[in-house]
Amino acid sequence: MQIAEQIVLVTGGARGLGTSIVHAFAAQGARVVINYRNSAAAAETLAASYGPEHAFAVRADVTDRAQVAAIFTQAQAHFGAPVTTVVNNALADFQFNGDARSGAADISWDEFEAQFSGSVRGALNTTQQALAGMREAGFGRIINIGTNLFQNPVVPYHDYTASKAALLSLTRTLASDLGPHNIAVNMVSGGLLRTTDASAATPEDVFDFIAASTPLRRVTTPDEFADAVLFFASPWARSVTGQNLVVDGGLVMN
């Protein structure tokens, strides 16, 4: 299915990386459901910029199964067809500032639970709610947003990194389970992006250090990362599933 034929849900689509992903899909003619939790004004403004034929905003906490079910009901009612593509981008409250994060000696299990709930429970909720429509369409694409930190743990984001590693495992088991239904499940993993709401707290010298460490000598932008998300939704990736594509300027090489 061409991207222009797809109905795409982007969780956490009203800010940061999510907004770049929304723009990337909308530029290719897709119809986009912009999910948000707190950023109502930004979500409505973003949706209005494309018009109701191409985008609409819906509030939901992706960790709440009933609220996620309502997203899919509203999306089908709005566009007259089921969601075909889900981008699990929503991030539980987190700031990328290593100096401010809990270390090994004092991190709490509650911090882990918050990240696991946002990353794994959220992705499971959206996947399960999407399945009926994807099977009806005979096509489905689930794209999870990961991190390069579980391959290159240079910053002790213990809770965030563990949750994304679990999400990669879920990506691969779902890919195996759903492949017979023509539903592909993949992950796109980045490093620090310049700049999102979450990375705004990162000191400038950290950005400079990362840029100097990459073969491209620069930090990946949200728009560059969003381009890679498009690949997994495109016909060019029709035989790709269960994969993790690292998009970080070559900092981590698989």
Image: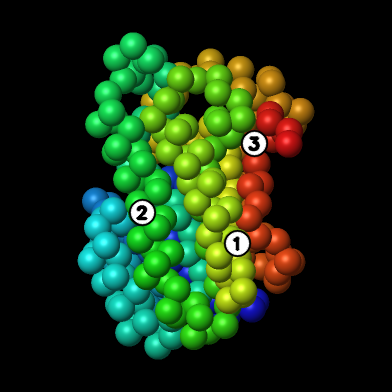
Q: In this view, does 111 lie above or below 12?
A: above
Q: Residue 185 carries which label?
A: none
Query: Which mark is nearer the camera, 1 or 2?
Result: 1
Q: Helix or strand or loop: what does disc 3 sit on?
A: loop
Which residue sits at x=40%, y=58%? 124
What residue would you read off at disc 2? 122
The crowd level at tag 1 (other Cα within 10 Å; few <14, some 14-19, many 20+) is: some
Instruction: Tell me which label, 2 or 3, sits earlier in the chain.
Output: 2
Q: Are marks 2 and 3 in contact (CB under 8 Å)?
A: no
Q: Toward which corner of the image does residue 40 lie, by quadrant?
A: bottom left
Q: Would residue 65 be found to the left or right of residue 19 on screen?
A: left
- Return the x and y of residue 119 as percentages of the image width and height: 40, 46
Amino acid at pointer 2: Gly
- Return the x and y of residue 14 as percentages of the image width and height: 37, 55
Q: Toward which corner of the image does residue 44 lie, by quadrant?
A: bottom left
Q: In this view, does 66 lie above or below 136?
A: above
